[in-house]
């Protein structure tokens, strides 16, 4: 079942996370072209090599339908494979495996996977408040007939914070809750961010006391356990083994993946504290032939600290209920015995909307391709990457391996 | 209506659920084929996909599956409920419901605790939300409490609404007009004065003789903008006074229309209603719909949605 490991990430590009107010504004099409060019240069490949496109659909500024055709035309490419992925924070991981699958099926040889996430310049009739309006209800639909509009919003159930908080509360009731262990996730990742010049919190240290003294947003989550939204954008080139041989950098072969979508609201999960990444990771490991013990670094989607805890447990790195003990017993920095989110994670790198998931994918590629500079791990062949969309609603797992 | 909070819009599928709540009953769906229970309302069974669901009354007893206390409102409209105990309740039938837990002290909230429903009347017309409370509490019906009821009144008898009392502010937007103001006569002399002041001396306003033959109204009419500013001549008895703000700013108008003419010599009067209250970082924005009519005419001559910003 699954991939043979004949497709690899060969190049990447990622805008430095910046505050929305000060980040450059670019049309999304323009960002797609700019990121494509940078990623191709990174790979040492050419526009003429591209014959596949995977792009985000929602929140694409210049179109709500026919996004791939518009983007391909803008780029000036023709493709054999065009795909829109709508999986929130899981989109990056999901784009990569779809590209790898299309390549292994023989559909194409080089796929641009891209998510623009800087603001676009607004036209004279566009409301500058559109973004605030669009974000107002978080991931909640307000459409007539949308169950969440009818059964969640009237009670104040809205957005991501409280959903993740309720998952954390249930975890606490089932397994206990160690606030300082949870804070240590953010603290160890912040250490890593001191070695990534692009991280939004580069140059700002963080202690467990800082995290626990920060404002409570929704019990038990503090504001420093929650990602900061930033402008950004990212792209990777996934290419066939043959093309990868021509690439400048050491390729990161996609040897395993999994995806699982279990619900929209975690309230309707079979069990709130058993997250979809359990199934996704099981499949990814089985496909690659690796086990969690073989992984040199875990790049775990980290919109919240609780996401990291549950992902570590459900992906099989630590038994259920023992995650907090594990976190306290291990050094999670790139210098430690369990390197986790070696770029700082999105908690310290910044979350550029759906492109935030690429920070984990690209860090895994950077490690495998020996591009991680001061953060470079000595053992860097086997990377685990996870993606999480919604409120743990949809999750994906990738195993990337150096060839 | 007495709230700017998002309210449920019942669909054809869900209507029996909301209707039952208004009758202080909880009805959820059970499949006639596989006996599985389903929440939220759908037309199909999530266990067997059969289209054979039936709403059945249940007692609403259940347990607290999870919860959180909001330390920052999820939306500004919920600022008056802080902290909200957002909760997931698992009914004894196995289905889960997103709700809020009420009348339980923070320290008494325990996941797994037994809970029972509260039918919370959230508007004067009986709209009901399903909340839950500890099984040790009485539960049952929570009557609608007009947030304006217990507020102080000023010498004019107006209810004093503190600018930070959001639920009271929202309650002002109740879509009912004030009584009519005093009356005021718009005569030709006034129209002529306005023509001179504004420079708008178009014959339809000023030439009484020509208007007799050429005007569609067979007479001169007042400038729309004249009638608009005459609102200052009309004393409207607002039932409330906003208090406790630093500054009050006339922020302009969201809508200005002149649907009906005011023929020279007409008597006008006006009334208003609070159309909307919104809260943002700018402050509290009150939209007051001002209507001016020729006495006896149902169609307004001026509709002006005045925006007043308090901070």
Image (spheres, coloured by chain):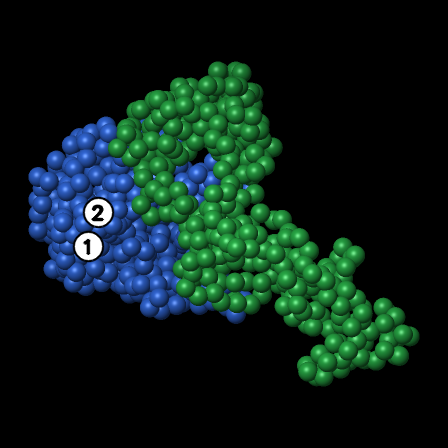
Chain colours: A blue, B green
Q: Position of residue A151 (x, y in %)?
A: 47, 36
Q: Position of residue B305 (x, y in %)?
A: 60, 61
Q: Position of residue B165 (x, y in %)?
A: 43, 50
Cβ–Cβ below 8 Å for labels 2 and 1? yes
Left or right placement of residue B14 versus residue A54 in this view = right
In the foreground, A403 or A21: A21
In the foreground, A13 or A301: A301
Left or right placement of residue B175 versus residue A165 in this view = right
**Residue drawn at point x = 58 percent, y = 65 percent:** B253
- CA–CA distance between discs 2 and 1? 9 Å
In the rendered structure, the residue with mark 1 lies on which chain?
A
Of callouts 2 and 1, the N-terminal one: 2
**Residue drawn at point x = 35 percent, y = 52 percent:** A354
Residue B59, relative to residue A355: is it above or below? above
Left or right placement of residue B78 versus residue A65 in this view = left
Tell me the residue that label 2 is attached to.
A299
**Residue drawn at point x = 8 percent, y = 39 percent:** A329
**Residue drawn at point x = 14 percent, y = 42 percent:** A180
């Amino acid at each position: 079942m699954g991939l043979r490991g004949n497709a690899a990430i060969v190049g990447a590009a990622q805008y430095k996370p910046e505050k929305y107010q000060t980040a450059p504004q670019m049309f999304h099409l323009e960002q797609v072209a700019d990121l494509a060019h940078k990623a191709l240069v990174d790979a040492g490949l050419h526009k003429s090599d591209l014959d596949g496109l995977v792009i985000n659909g929602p929140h694409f500024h210049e179109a709500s339908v026919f996004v791939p055709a518009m983007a391909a035309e803008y780029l000036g490419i023709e493709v054999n494979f065009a795909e829109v992925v709508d999986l929130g924070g899981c989109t990056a991981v999901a784009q990569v495996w779809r590209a790898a699958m299309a390549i292994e099926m023989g559909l194409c040889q080089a796929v641009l996977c891209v998510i623009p996430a800087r603001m676009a310049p607004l036209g004279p009739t566009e409301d500058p408040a559109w973004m605030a309006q669009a974000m107002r209800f978080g991931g909640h639909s307000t459409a007539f007939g949308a169950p969440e509009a009818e059964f969640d919003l009237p009670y104040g159930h809205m957005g991501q914070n409280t959903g993740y908080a309720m998952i954390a509360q249930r975890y606490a009731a089932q397994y206990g809750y160690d606030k300082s262990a949870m804070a240590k996730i953010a603290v160890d990742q912040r250490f890593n961010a001191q070695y990534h010049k692009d991280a939004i919190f580069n140059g700002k240290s963080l202690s467990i006391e800082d995290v626990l003294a920060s404002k409570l947003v929704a019990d038990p989550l503090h504001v420093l356990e929650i990602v900061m939204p930033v402008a950004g954008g990212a792209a990777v080139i996934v290419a066939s083994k043959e093309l990868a041989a021509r690439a400048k950098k050491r390729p990161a072969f996609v040897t395993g993946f999994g995806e699982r979508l279990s619900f929209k609201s975690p309230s309707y999960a079979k069990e709130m504290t058993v997250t979809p990444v359990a199934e996704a990771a099981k499949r990814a490991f089985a496909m690659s032939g690796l086990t969690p013990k073989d992984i040199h670094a875990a790049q775990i989607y980290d919109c919240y600290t609780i996401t990291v805890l549950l992902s570590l447990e459900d992906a099989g790195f630590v038994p259920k209920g023992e995650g907090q003990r594990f976190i306290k017993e291990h050094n999670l920095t790139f210098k430690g015995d369990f390197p986790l989110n070696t770029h700082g994670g999105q908690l310290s790198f910044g979350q550029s909307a759906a492109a935030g998931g690429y920070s984990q994918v690209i860090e895994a590629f950077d490690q495998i391709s020996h591009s991680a500079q001061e953060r470079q791990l000595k053992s860097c062949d086997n990377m685990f990457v996870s993606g999480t969309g919604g409120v743990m609603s949809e999750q994906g797992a990738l195993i990337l391996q150096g060839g | 209506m007495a709230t700017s909070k998002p309210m449920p819009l019942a669909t054809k599928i869900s209507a029996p659920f909301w209707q039952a709540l208004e009758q202080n009953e909880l009805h959820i769906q059970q499949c006639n084929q596989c006996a599985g229970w389903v929440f939220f309302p759908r037309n199909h069974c999530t266990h067997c996909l059969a289209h054979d669901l039936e709403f059945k009354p249940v007692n609403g007893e259940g347990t607290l599956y999870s919860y959180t206390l909001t330390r920052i409102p999820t939306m500004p409209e919920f600022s008056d409920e802080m902290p909200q105990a957002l909760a997931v309740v698992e009914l004894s039938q196995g289905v889960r419901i997103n709700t809020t837990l009420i009348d339980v002290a923070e320290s008494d909230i325990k996941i797994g605790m037994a809970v029972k429903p509260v039918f919370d009347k959230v508007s004067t017309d009986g709209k009901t939300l399903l909340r839950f409370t500890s099984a040790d509490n009485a539960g049952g019906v929570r009557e609608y409490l007009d947030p304006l009821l217990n507020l102080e009144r000023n010498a004019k008898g107006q209810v004093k609404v503190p600018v930070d009392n959001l639920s009271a502010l929202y309650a002002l937007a109740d879509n009912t007009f004030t009584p009519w103001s005093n009356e005021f006569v718009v005569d030709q002399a006034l129209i002529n004065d306005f023509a001179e002041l504004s420079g708008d001396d178009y014959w339809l306003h000023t030439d009484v003789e020509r208007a007799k033959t050429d005007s569609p109204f067979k007479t001169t009419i007042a400038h729309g903008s004249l009638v608009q500013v005459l609102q200052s001549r009309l004393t409207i008895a607002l039932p409330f006074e906003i208090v406790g703000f630093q500054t009050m700013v006339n922020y302009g108008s969201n809508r200005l229309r002149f649907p009906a003419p005011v023929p020279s010599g007409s008597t006008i009067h006006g009334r208003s209603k609070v159309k909307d209250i919104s809260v943002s970082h700018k402050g509290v924005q009150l939209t007051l719909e001002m209507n001016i009519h020729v006495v006896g005419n149902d169609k307004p001559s001026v509709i002006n949605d005045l925006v007043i910003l308090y901070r």
